[in-house]
Amino acid sequence: MVTLVDFAKNINKNKWSAVIFPEGTRSRNGKSKSFAPSGLKIITKYNKEGYVVPLTINNSWKVFKYGKFPFGIGSPITITTHEPIKINTLPFKELLEKTETIIKEHIK
């Protein structure tokens, strides 16, 4: 957590973009796991003027369903970029719920 706090502070200081995967690890069957709030909570705490841009990634589980080898060839991965959400416009709980809902609604 200390490293994540330092990273969150550097995002603000250096005007970086960051990517986190709140599900933790890739699904093995395409069904979304529950989002863990800790990473997003820490990043938003130090970046109130920033934005969350939800991304839905479809079919990555098919490519890696056997692990690193053999690849599940012929399964196109698609990434859908959704409307940015300004961090300071919603309480954290609503921001997390909205982000999770948007992403899950677009999983095919």
Image: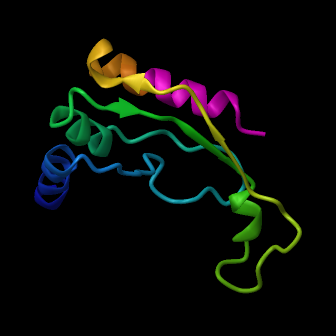
Q: Is residue 49 left or right of residue 56?
A: left
Q: Is residue 27 left or right of residue 10?
A: right
Task: Examine the image and state in which quarter residue 37 appears.
Answer: top left
Tally of marks: 0
Instruction: Identify which residue is drawn at 29% across, 31% down.
Output: 50
Instruction: Identify which residue is drawn at 49% across, 39% down.
Output: 34
Farthest residue, direction right: 74
Q: Which residues are magenta?
A: 97-108
Instruction: Identify which residue is drawn at 45% across, 51% down.
Output: 21
Query: Who is closer to the viewer here, 86 or 108?
Result: 86
Q: Is residue 90 visible?
A: no
Farthest residue, direction bottom: 69
Q: Main secondary structure of the magenta part?
A: helix
Query: Who is closer to the viewer here, 19 or 26?
Result: 19
Query: Who is closer to the viewer here, 11 or 98?
Result: 11
Q: Residue 4 at x, y = what percent?
A: 19, 55
Q: Residue 105 at x, y = what percent?
A: 67, 27
Q: Residue 41 at x, y = what percent?
A: 25, 36
Q: Residue 65 at x, y = what percent?
A: 72, 69
As for residue 14 lying within the magenta part, the answer is no
Task: Examine the image and state in which quarter residue 42 appears.
Answer: top left
Answer above or below: position of 46 versus 18: above
Instruction: Identify which residue is drawn at 42% across, 23% down.
Output: 85
Q: Quadrant of the C terminus?
A: top right
